[in-house]
Image: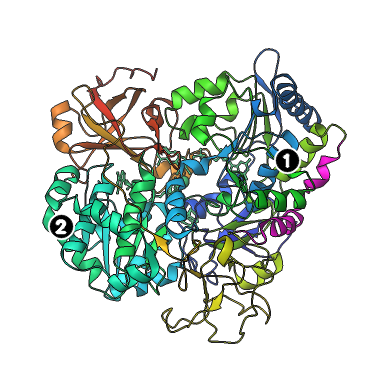
């Protein structure tokens, strides 16, 4: 038991708010208090962070392994038996059908150490190529577009503290008032400083209410909207020709594509009036600096990569990328949404954001892992494709950190695929809707009970510290991998490569990432503790820091080529005169790389150092409304619930605030349907039927309905969603599918989902 206050971070979203934890006398319960020294949230927390300790309680969590009995029930078992069963289940599939018949599914909530170990476990212990994770459902389109344009993907290429000092921010399909409440102050301060905020969202959200201008396009039309804006920028002569010439490539083709998208045509597609388009152009182009930030609205589309590319085009055409207080950024979602996509749990990836197909990367990582590069499998399937192959090509699955029965698109089908597996093992802290279907459930430790690093939406690597002793009966994900490696190694002592001490894993991750685009080699636990986080890339062999106050944050091209030495000290005045970031304990020692808060100021991370325009054109949503399914459904979040709800639906205070699913619809649609506030309505798509109470509001477009996706059962939004995939990122179209609404007789039990 410890009795001191432990400074750490929230278990939930990508803001990774700082908080202090104080254990109660029993050493188990823990109290959350303000931690003002962490600059991102300066003590502020949302309700989820404040109430996070409730999920540590034994009354809602798993404290014993569970195994499927002969009779079909999940019953408590010893760790020895449970681990033996998992090794046997996965091992048998591998022996009978080959290594690729074993799948692994990870999560963007896992720490860097866990994500790194899971990718290594799949490739070295299981020898399978079939690993992917829920981040594919999250920011993969922005990652693909960012990589294509800039040669490097880091959610935000600048710290949040730059936002209040820019001139204009366009927030596209992002609702931080509900999804990252403490971040709202950056936008409030922007407006207090005379800057403007534009919000693009089919709904007038709490965020849109704060905006100077709110555009409400039809879901799935952000690509056309961005093209229309670019058309006007060109027509009004507002492009930055010198910047285009010196720092970009591919402009002519992109310009031609944009010129084909007349504002009137764009108005017809998006429903956004031409005068509003003109107003956006004026607000975005007049100030000296401006930013575009996207989140899941434009990204979770079957054309998400092109859509984000079109918004990046706007930044490039106006010289608003890789310059102080300007740029494009994606607001990453999960606690380790950034780090989780860098260290190898993605189907095509090796640690350090390396490519699995790159022979140099394979050789480097294989050496760190002590294996033959030829033994590393190639790229596997993307998340939805992997889930869709369960029970056919993939016969057994190890799942860590996701609840796809609630969160995957076309969820009834995914659930049926999961049920058809020969063997399913789930590591979780609670008995989620997916864990209930498992043959073996392994109960694991959580944030406050274990140490590990996460990388927040700014690319800031953080240390989450252990504050309390875990309850008896649970083990960490790292211990699980260690034990399984021993059992599946076939006498090869593979467990040695899977240390249970997170710092030991991080030391190996540093070496594996060295020289890669996401280079962590200059980061240590000690630095993280002292400096309140370090921004990657941070090479171990970087140029010496100038040291002392006034040292500007570094600005590098980043990326595989640039990160290895192209770093130059940035001129602090160019970055708005901040000098160092306001970290708690000052600068790293001389000779130590200070990390890279701001990217691309000198060059982009592409081969030639230029950013690449994306020559994109408008396309329709995969499933346009028709006579049978005349309405568009979009989905998203509410402030008091998190993701599949596995954790937050176990917290009374949060359930009181957000007790269940609902269907948000416009009064005109409600009237046509005869629906009344709070009465159940059925939403039917080609995939299934969901029922939830109506929430009638003029804040949504009349041709669109909205459902949050946090609940299972008949109100499960993902029963309806369309798994149409983006061709590049393989992101499913969570944000637009065709549905019809049906009245449900009040008092009658609602029909269940097929
Ligand atoms: N409370 C809470 N906070 C969270 C989470 C949570 O589950 N709950 N999850 C975390 C995670 S993993 C993520 S990824 C982030 C997500 O954070 P956000 O992206 O902010 O969340 P969403 O609600 O999915 O989508 C944002 C907005 O997109 C709008 N939208 C829908 N369709 C379209 C469209 O076609 N175009 C445009 N422009 N907008 C559209 C929706 O109306 C919604 O208001 O939140 C993180 N924070
Ligand atoms: N319709 C619709 N669907 C969506 C979205 C949408 O906007 N609309 N958004 C998508 C997005 S952006 C995301 S990120 C996904 C998220 O959806 P999921 O992947 O289902 O995410 P969570 O609900 O966070 O699930 C995490 C699970 O891991 C467990 N867990 C937490 N910490 C740990 C740990 O350290 N170790 C282990 N082993 N388990 C742990 C939790 O208890 C929980 O059961 O949903 C996607 N689905
Ligand atoms: S905003 Fe995100 S990180 Fe901050 S307290 Fe809420 S859930 Fe936690
Ligand atoms: Mo996400």
- Mark 2 element type: helix
Q: Indicate yes or no: mark 2 CB to ligand 1 under 8 Å.
A: no
Residue on which the image places disc 2: 276
- 490 to the left or right of 660: right
Q: How crowded is mark 1: few (under 14 residues within 10 Å), some or many (20 or more)?
A: few
- What label does residue 374 carry, if any? 1
Give the farthest residue toward the top: 71
Between marks 2 and 1, how big is the CA–CA gap?
56 Å
Depicted 159 relative to depicted 543: above or below? above
The magenta-colored residue range is 492-516
Whether pointer 2 and pointer 1 mark residues with C-beta atoms closer than 8 Å, the reply is: no
Q: How crowded is mark 2: few (under 14 residues within 10 Å), some or many (20 or more)?
A: some
> Can residue 578 be seen by looking at this rendering?
yes
Q: Indicate yes or no: mark 1 CB to ligand 2 under 8 Å.
A: no
Where's the N terminus, which quadrant? bottom right
Instruction: Tell which circle, 2 or 1, labels the residue nearer the N-terminal end.
Output: 2
Residue 446 colored magenta? no
In percent of width and height, residue 746 lies at 25, 21
- 369 to the left or right of 593: right
At x 64%, y 74%, the residue is 593
Where's the C terminus, which quadrant? top left
Q: Is the magenta stretch mostly helix, strand or loop?
A: helix
At x 28%, y 51%, the residue is 205
Colouring method of the image: rainbow
Q: Which of 116 and 677 is in front in this view?
A: 116
- 373 to the left or right of 379: right
- 261 to the left or right of 149: left
In percent of width and height, residue 409 lies at 43, 32
In percent of width and height, residue 221 lies at 25, 44
Q: Which of 210 and 606 is in front in this view?
A: 606
Which quadrant holds residue 317? bottom left
């Amino acid at each position: 038991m410890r009795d001191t206050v432990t400074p750490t971070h929230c278990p939930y979203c990508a803001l990774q708010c700082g908080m202090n934890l104080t254990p109660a006398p029993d050493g188990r319960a823990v109290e959350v208090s303000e931690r003002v020294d962490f600059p991102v949230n300066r003590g502020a927390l949302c309700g989820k962070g404040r109430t996070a300790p409730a999920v540590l309680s034994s009354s809602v969590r798993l404290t014993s392994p569970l195994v499927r009995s002969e009779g079909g029930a999940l019953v408590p078992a010893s760790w020895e038996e449970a681990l033996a069963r998992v090794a046997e289940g996965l091992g048998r599939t591998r022996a009978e059908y080959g290594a690729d018949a074993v799948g692994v599914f990870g999560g963007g909530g896992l720490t860097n150490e866990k994500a790194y170990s899971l990718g290594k476990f799949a490739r070295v212990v299981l020898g399978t190529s079939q690993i992917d994770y829920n981040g594919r459902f999250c920011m993969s389109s922005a990652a693909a577009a960012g990589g294509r344009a800039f040669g490097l993907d880091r959610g935000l290429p600048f710290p949040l503290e730059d936002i209040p000092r820019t001139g204009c921010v366009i927030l596209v399909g992002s609702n931080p008032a509900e999804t990252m409440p403490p971040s709202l102050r950056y936008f409030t301060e922007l407006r207090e400083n005379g800057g403007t905020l534009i919000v693009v969202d089919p709904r007038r959200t709490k965020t849109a209410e704060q905006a100077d201008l709110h555009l409400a396009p039809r879901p799935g039309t952000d690509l056309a909207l961005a093209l229309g804006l670019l058309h006007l920028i060109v027509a009004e002569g507002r492009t930055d020709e010198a910047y285009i010439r010196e720092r970009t490539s591919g402009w002519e083709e992109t310009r031609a594509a944009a010129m084909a998208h007349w504002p009137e045509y764009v108005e017809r597609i998006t429903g956004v009036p031409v005068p509003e388009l003109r107003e956006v152009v004026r607000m975005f182009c007049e100030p000296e600096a401006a930013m575009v930030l996207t989140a899941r609205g434009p990204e979770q589309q079957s054309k998400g990569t092109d859509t984000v590319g079109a918004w990046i085009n706007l930044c490039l055409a106006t010289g608003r990328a890789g310059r102080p207080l300007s740029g494009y950024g994606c607001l990453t979602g999960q606690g380790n949404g950034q780090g989780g996509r860098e260290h190898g749990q993605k189907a095509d990836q090796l640690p350090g954001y390396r490519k699995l197909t790159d022979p140099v990367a394979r050789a480097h990582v294989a050496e760190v892992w002590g294996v033959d590069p030829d033994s590393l499998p190639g790229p596997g399937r993307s998340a939805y494709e992997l889930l869709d192959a369960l029970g056919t090509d993939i016969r057994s699955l190890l799942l860590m950190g996701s609840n796809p029965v609630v969160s995957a698109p076309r969820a009834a089908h995914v659930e049926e695929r999961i049920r058809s597996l020969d063997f399913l093992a789930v590591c979780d802290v609670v008995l989620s809707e997916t864990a209930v279907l498992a043959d073996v459930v392994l109960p694991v430790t959580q944030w406050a009970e274990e140490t590990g690093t996460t990388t927040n939406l700014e690319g800031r690597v953080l240390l989450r510290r252990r504050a309390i002793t875990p309850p008896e009966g649970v083990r960490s994900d790292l211990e699980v991998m260690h034990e399984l490696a021993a059992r599946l190694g076939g006498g090869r002592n593979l467990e040695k490569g899977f240390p249970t001490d997170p710092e030991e894993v991080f030391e190996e991750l540093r070496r594996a990432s060295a020289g890669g685009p996401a280079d962590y080699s200059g980061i240590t636990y000690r630095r993280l503790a002292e400096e309140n986080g370090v921004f990657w890339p941070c090479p171990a062999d970087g140029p010496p820091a100038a040291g002392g106050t006034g040292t500007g944050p570094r600005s590098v091209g980043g990326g595989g080529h640039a990160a290895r030495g192209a770093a130059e000290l940035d001129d602090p005045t160019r970055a708005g005169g901040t000098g160092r970031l306001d970290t708690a304990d000052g600068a790293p020692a001389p000779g130590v790389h200070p990390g890279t808060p701001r990217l691309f100021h000198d060059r982009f991370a592409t081969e030639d150092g230029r950013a690449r325009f994306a020559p994109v054109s408008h396309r329709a949503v995969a499933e346009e409304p028709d006579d049978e399914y005349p309405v568009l459904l979009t989905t998203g979040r509410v402030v008091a619930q998190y993701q599949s709800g596995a954790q937050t639906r176990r917290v009374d205070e949060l359930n009181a605030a957000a007790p269940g699913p609902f269907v948000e619809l416009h009064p005109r649609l409600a009237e046509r349907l005869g629906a009344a506030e709070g009465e159940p309505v059925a939403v039917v798509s080609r995939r299934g039927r969901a029922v939830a109470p109506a929430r009638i509001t003029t804040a949504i477009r009349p041709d669109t309905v909205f459902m949050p996706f946090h609940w299972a059962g008949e109100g499960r939004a993902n029963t309806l969603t369309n798994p149409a995939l983006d061709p590049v990122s393989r992101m499913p179209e969570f944000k637009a599918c065709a549905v019809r609404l049906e009245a449900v007789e009040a008092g009658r039990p609602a029909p269940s989902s097929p």
